[in-house]
Amino acid sequence: MQPSAAKQKVIVLDFGAQYGQLIARRVRDLHVYSEIMPCDASAAEIAAEQPSAIILSGGPASVYADDAPKIDPAVLELGVPVLGFCYGHQIMAVTLGGEVAHSEVGEYGPAKLYVDEDAEAGHASALFAGTPAEQTVWMSHRDAVSRAPEGFVVTSHTDVCPVASMECPEKRLYSTQFHPEVRHSVYGNQMLSNFLFNVCGLEKNWTMEGLVESKVAEIREKVGDHRVILALSGGVDSSVVAALCSRAIGKQLTCVFVNHGLLRKNEPEQVEEVFTRQFDVDFIHVHAEERYAKLLDGVTEPEAKRRIIGTQFWEEFFAVAKQLEEDGRPVQYLAQGTIYPDIIESGARKTGGKASTIKSHHNLIPFPDGVSFDLIEPLDHFFKDEVRELGLALGLPEHIVYRQPFPGPGLAIRIIGAVSPEKLEILKNADAIVREELDAYNARLFEETGERNSEHSCWQYFAVLPDIKSVGVMGDERTYARPIILRAVESSDAMTADWAKIPYDVLTRVSSRIVAEVPGVNRVAYDITSKPPATIEWE
């Protein structure tokens, strides 16, 4: 019996992989609804969700380690199709009686995969249907399945991995050592499609329009007649949350814009103008520039900057909430534009897994003493490009939806070393030139291709001010001034990024203008490092 299209749901069991949410997103890209659950969820808990299919994510552990995450064996007996990746492949094997061994040679990155099909036995892999016999996949492992469980057929191998994939069609159990969810697995999307539609018999029925309706209903049901306060930065994430909350609860929402003095040039004025006209909500502009300047004076360590900015952020919110209470409008809920990359980079996994902390985020730091808001985070399961799609579905204008990502701590983490008024002025002016020139470059590409993320377009671009000075020559005189570093990347979800291949004439114009128009700068450098190994931001 095939699942009802209206009730389709793919459950991703998260074993602690940083790609866990990416799997769910790839499923949603194919217009099938997906949610994440912790890997230690019981079969009964999973069955209660009425899943149409289950996907087991990868993970950093060895399946034989004492503290390795396990799976309830009954999950594999629910009669629901199951697909495992990497660690999920290995845990499926050992749970069902197969073996996993430590390889002398690991596989990391692209690998050549050979699809095995036993024509005499009449077996053709359902997972590899429509893909070539040799293809490139993305591997990240040293342990590997050395013996498949009874009833399974080995469907592919690499030069290093004898069981690169396996399947038991009778029980609808499938698994791969590689990562189909990663774009580097060339036919990975086809494999996911094969699993969802050919094996599971699902339909493409999940859309952003449907998501808007469900999210608005969720917010309305949760909030009731209480008031909500929202951190409105003017960025994509908080704008989409504002639109959702505005549609759900109207004037019960108070949008608070905290101006910490670390925004881009002319941005505070733009934010106030846009959001007093676009939304039928209360808007409060908090001028906290001087308070932040005193707190950050002399602070050089990036995580210290983030903690100071995050802590003061909540103090400012608490002050507004307290004033609202005194005015007879007490606030019960705090809405936030937290998205999944924020969570995963902070190691704050909501799904029970564990990930190393790359950097902290202002909207994940605990509240100060005395704050007792309940949280509303309607975007915490979504990546940036999905949030943009949701914004369009909500009717937000494109200049908001496609606004550049900007970190909560603002320019404080694009100034290496201590923040000062002089450095802020230099960076604001240089960054304005970068955005003006690359906005124009992106606009030309959009006119030519009709795509916002075409092969050579930039997804995010900004200036960085390092804590050094360099020698230069200007007007036949020696200078000793600051350099500016240009950072421009191509990406769709912020999880990975490559440096943008900007034409030389555009780079020349950016450099020439910055040196000519920004006092105190005599050099411009271009960062050509991808993520990983670097992050998009410098701090």
Image: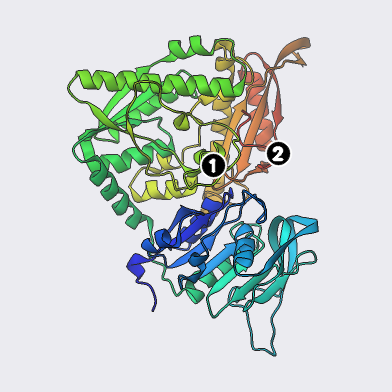
Image quarter hosting the C terminus: top right
Q: For the residues carrying marks 2 and 1, which lies nearer the camera in this image?
A: 1
The kind of residue on which mark 2 rests is Thr
Observer-nearest of 332 and 255:
332
Q: Would you call the spot at circle 2 few (<14 residues within 10 Å), some (14-19), or many (20 or more)?
A: some
268 vs 178, nearest the viewer: 178
In the rendered image, is residue 187 in sight? Answer: no
**Residue under label 1:** 344
Pointers 2 and 1 in contact (C-beta within 8 Å)? no
Above or below, 226 relative to 306:
below
Density class for disc 1 (Cα within 10 Å; few <14, some 14-19, many ≥20) is many
The location of residue 97, given as percent across then percent down, is: 64, 70
Q: CA distance from mark 2 to mark 1?
A: 21 Å
Left or right: where 227 falls relative to 204: left
Position of residue 277 measured from the top left corner of the image (x, y, whole percent): 28, 32
| Residue at 59% from the left image edge and 76% from the top image edge | 168
Q: Which mark is residue 497?
A: none
Q: Quadrant of the N terminus?
A: bottom left
On screen, 403 above or below 413?
A: below
Instruction: Determine whether the residue tagged by mark 2 lies in a helix, strand or loop.
Output: loop
Disc 2 marks which residue? 529
* Residue placed most toward the observer, 104 or 210: 104
